[in-house]
Amino acid sequence: MKNKEKYREFMDTFQIQRDFFKCHEILEEIWIEETKCETRKHVSINLLLIAVGLYHWRNKNYKGAIQVLENSLNNYDEVSKDIEKLNIDSKYLKQKVLDTIESLKIKKEYEEIYLPTY
């Protein structure tokens, strides 16, 4: 997998700094570099949308968070192996996204969610 250093920076930013806007920037840079914007079927897009969804939830934009998290599941199964290569449990993460969408539908207050790593 290319951009190992940038993916590490993303993981640190997501897991420790909790700066979801910066996560978006890092992952967008990876996506542009690796795909030349020619496809949205890329691990960076799915992770980017999860980070953006949490950003919206933290800012009480429930509708936006639901929409973005639902979009994060587009092509998810197709990139799950690449998610696994980042030492993220993709099945658990997918279930966590689905659970979060349900929490958002009842306007549950924001709670910290971390990427489930091995």
Image (spheres, rainbow, N blue to C red):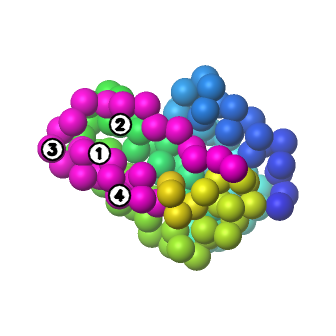
Q: Mark 1 or mark 4: which is in front?
A: 4
Asked which secondary structure carries label 3, the reply is: loop
Residue found at the very far bottom of the displayed protein: 78
Q: Looking at numbered disc 2 in the image, what kind of residue is underneath it?
A: His
Question: Between marks 1 and 4, how big is the CA–CA gap?
Answer: 15 Å
Q: Mark 2 or mark 4: which is in front?
A: 4
What is the total number of numbered labels drawn onto the structure image? 4
Q: Are marks 1 and 3 in contact (CB under 8 Å)?
A: no
Which residues make up the magenta segment? 94-118
Q: Is residue 109 magenta?
A: yes
Question: Between marks 2 and 3, how big is the CA–CA gap?
Answer: 15 Å
> Residue sitting at 68 percent across and 39 percent down?
10
Lower position in the chain sequence, tag 2 or tag 1:
2
Q: Mark 1 or mark 3: which is in front?
A: 3
Within the image, what quadrant is residue 32 found in? bottom right
Task: Find disc 4 in the rendering and name its residue.
Answer: 98
Task: Find disc 1 in the rendering and name its residue.
Answer: 64
Q: Position of residue 1 (x, y in %)?
A: 83, 61
